[in-house]
Every structure is written in C-alpha cells, then in structure tokens.
Image (spheres, coloured by chain):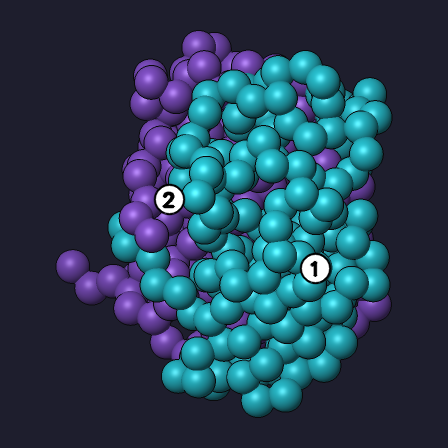
Chain colours: A purple, B cyan
Amino acid sequence: MKLTSIGVIHSPHLQAAGTPVQPVFASGIEGTLELNPEYAGGLKDLEGFDRIWILYWFDRAAEARLEVTPYLDTRPHGIFATRSPSRPNPLGISSVRVRRIEGNRIHILDVDVLDGTPLLDIKPYVPAFDAFAPERIGWFATAKNPPVADDRFEAKR
Amino acid sequence: MKLTSIGVIHSPHLQAAGTPVQPVFASGIEGTLELNPEYAGGLKDLEGFDRIWILYWFDRAAEARLEVTPYLDTRPHGIFATRSPSRPNPLGISSVRVRRIEGNRIHILDVDVLDGTPLLDIKPYVPAFDAFAPERIGWFATAKNPPVADDRFEAKR
C-alpha cells in the first residue's frame, strides 16, 4: 500500500504552533490545492460542489503514539479517539470550502493544513453521506482548550 | 509515504456487486473492525462516541482512472468529483455507527466495505468538524441510480 502525492497544499500555516486544529476554526483562511498537472482531468465537474474533503499526509508529525493528550483537552485519550496527527498512518481529512477552480489549482477556504503538505485525494462533500448528528461525542463534549495547535506533535528537526 | 494495515474490516459484503455504495444505504448492516492487537491501546475512550470515521484501502479496486461513470449516475465525471474506488490513491472513508467495543474489536453498523478490507485509521466523528450543509452538491443533486455497486471498478482476477 504505497501512496503517491497527487499535489501539494499551499496555506499560510508555516508551523504547527498557532495553526487552527480544524477547518471550523480556520473560517475564511485561504489556501490552494495545486494538483500535479497529470491529475487535472480528474477535477471535471468538481466546480459544482461548494465543499470537498481533502485527504493528506501529516508529513511533519512526530512518530505515532497510542495515547495522546490532544490540543483540545488536558487529559490523555487513545489516538483513535482523537484527530491528532501522530497516528499509525498519518492521514488527515479536512472538509474545506471551494472558492474556484483554475486548471490544476483549487482555491479553497478554511484551510487548517500546513503549507507544503502532500495531497493524497479529493472527494466531493455530500451531506447525505457525510453529515450526521450523533448524540454522544465522547470527550469533545467537554473540550475547552484554544483551538490552535502547538508543537507537541511536530517531528523534531 | 507507506501505509501499514492497522487491522481488517469484516463485513457480509463478499464482492462489489450488490454492496451498498455508502453507509447511508447500508443502514443496520453489521460489521467488525478487528485491530491488530498492538493497536488496541489506541482505542481508549473511543466507546464514548456514537459514530466514527474509518479510513481504508480499496484493495480490490481496478486501477485509477481520471474519469469514471459512478454507480449513482449514468454520465462520466472526474474521479475527484466522485467517491468511486478507482482513485490515484485508493483511499476510502466511511462514517459508521459504533455498537460496542470489546478489546481489539469494534462492532459497527452501516458497513459499506468489502469483507477483508485493510483498515488504515479510525477517527471520532465530531459534528462540529464534519457535519455541514452545503447548498451545491454537483451531480449528486440529480443522482438516481440504485445505491448498490456492480463490478465496474473491481480489479479483474
């Protein structure tokens, strides 16, 4: 199972510290998805969607841990009960808004991803498939910390 | 960027033909996520969530195409404007319901994944991060086909 970068995510976020931890906390922040030109044909009809999923590789995440204290809490939780980047497979998903598409470039809003992050996939956001209202949301129900990252999951350089 | 299977997805779906194409069309169908035992510690506190994301590898998908006619339509679209499995990186995401967790096994509902599919990641579903109501949903607005798969994206054996 080998991944190929299909492009790169451009954003104003140059380091983890201070980066919003989810698109909902990055409202209006502009970014660009720059697809490798050979994949541009795969964007046909994507301009009809207000919102997309981007899947990407947390390329600057520290190595995986099984328990982490996430940004939004002060207590440790299992890695799979969090959205923290130091995962066994460092895959991130973010639902972002599409501003416009120009050739192989998708201009997006609400970007919560570090500049230069490898892009792996784009999928249309479809509310019937993706929008649910579960009652129980675990520790997020009492999450209170400021919704920006720090360097706790950043690989040491 | 090399992926590691963290476990396997068990489901009643043995082949693409007839498999629901999204969890919303698989309501109540039971499956199990069997984590490799070394990852079981990462599940701590996941039992507090009604719903999770699973990320997985479409291991039986035919090779990537840039344009596909998806199950739900009769017209071709760019692969990134569809949720079809024959993608440059064959990564799938599904939002499923959690019934209960027993050790390294998560019993789920609404499974739309083939039996034996490699599991890559589990994330908690958090409505504030994941549930949106975009107005424009492209070609899905007029999608009408039956919501089950056929063999069009299955690799030839």
- What is the x, y in percent for residue A45? 61, 15
Q: Tell me where residue B133 appears, x and y as whole percent.
A: 79, 37
Query: Element at badge 2?
Result: loop
User: What type is the residue that disc 2 sits on?
Assistant: Leu
Total marks in image: 2
Q: Amino acid at mark 1?
A: Val
User: In the rendered image, which residue does mark 1 sit on?
Assistant: B111
Q: Residue at x 28, y 54 (%)?
A: B2
Task: Report if residue A98 is visible in the image.
Answer: no
Task: Work out whether A106 lies above or below B108.
Answer: above
Q: Which mark is residue A114?
A: 2
Pinpoint residue A141: horizontal percent, then vertical percent.
73, 71
The numbered mark at residue B42 is none
Task: Say whether residue A37 is left or right of residue B152.
Answer: left
Q: CA distance from mark 2 to mark 1?
A: 32 Å
Q: Depth check: A144 or B82 in front?
A: B82
B61 left or right of A154 in image = right
Residue name at image x 59 percent, y 81 percent: B105
